Image (cartoon, rainbow, N blue to C red):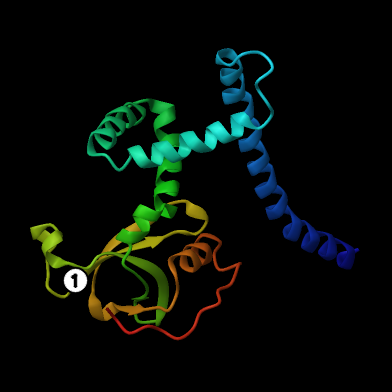
Amino acid sequence: MKSISRTFLTGLVTILPVILTLYLLYWLVISMESVLGNAIRQVMPEGMYWPGMGVIAGLIVVFLVGLLMHAYIVRWLFAKGEALFYHLPLINSVYRAMRDFFDFISPSTKREFEQVVAVSLGSADMQVIGFVTQAVPERLPKSIRSDDSILVYLPLSYMIGGYTVLLPRSAVRPLDMSMEEAMRFTLTAGVTGSNTGSDRQAR
């Protein structure tokens, strides 16, 4: 029975991420087709609509939103609207968690995380993986500014939070890991493993 259970669990762990990913894609496609497809039917002459137009329209909308977010006025308006969610009791907690997660994996945020590093903690040679968020002393608050200090973000596994700590440069060691590898490795508590080479030289 233990062998059967272990084999079943291995199969479940293998196939579940695939099923969840495909289901999410399916849900997105069906949602776009349902919402935008119905809107298109209202404005188009009868008979001219064909299945898939809602999905295409959804992709176009997403692309246009991405383009508009490059404009300062659009970002400002979005920030004002987003501030409303941060003042709603229940929605605040859910939205903030989702926003933090998607900001963490977004391309614009990756540019801010300058390097993946290993941070030494205590005298037991314990190390944790972190991301250098600020290496320029002039950009740090004057009260904590130091020529030898950098700001490092230490994420917790399974995206339940993290810590931003000020550390001396001697306490960090640059790692030869891409942002994608490091985020996947830390968010899954190392379960996924990592294919990395030798450490890079410090920037």
At x 17%, y 67%, the residue is: 136
Instruction: Determine whether the residue tagged by mark 1 lies in a helix, strand or loop.
Output: strand
Q: Position of residue 83 (x, y in %)?
A: 30, 30
Q: Position of residue 149 (x, y in %)?
A: 19, 71
| Nearer to the camera, 70 or 19 | 70
Q: Quadrant of residue 177?
A: bottom left
Q: Is residue 52 left or right of residue 169?
A: right
Q: Which residue is mark 1?
A: 149
Q: Amino acid at mark 1?
A: Ser
* Residue 32 in sight here: no
Q: Position of residue 45 (x, y in %)?
A: 61, 13
- Label 1 CA crowd tier, 10 Å (few <14, some 14–19, many 20+): many
Q: Which quadrant holds the N terminus?
A: bottom right
* Residue 177 in sight here: yes
At x 44%, y 47%, the residue is: 102
Q: Is residue 68 above or below residue 192?
A: above
At x 47%, y 67%, the residue is: 182
Count of marks placed on residues = 1
Q: Position of residue 13 (x, y in %)?
A: 73, 59
Q: Is residue 21 left or right of residue 43?
A: right
| Nearer to the camera, 133 or 120 | 133
Q: Quadrant of residue 11?
A: bottom right
Q: Is residue 60 left or right of residue 28?
A: left
At x 27%, y 78%, the residue is: 203
Residue projecting furthest to the right: 1
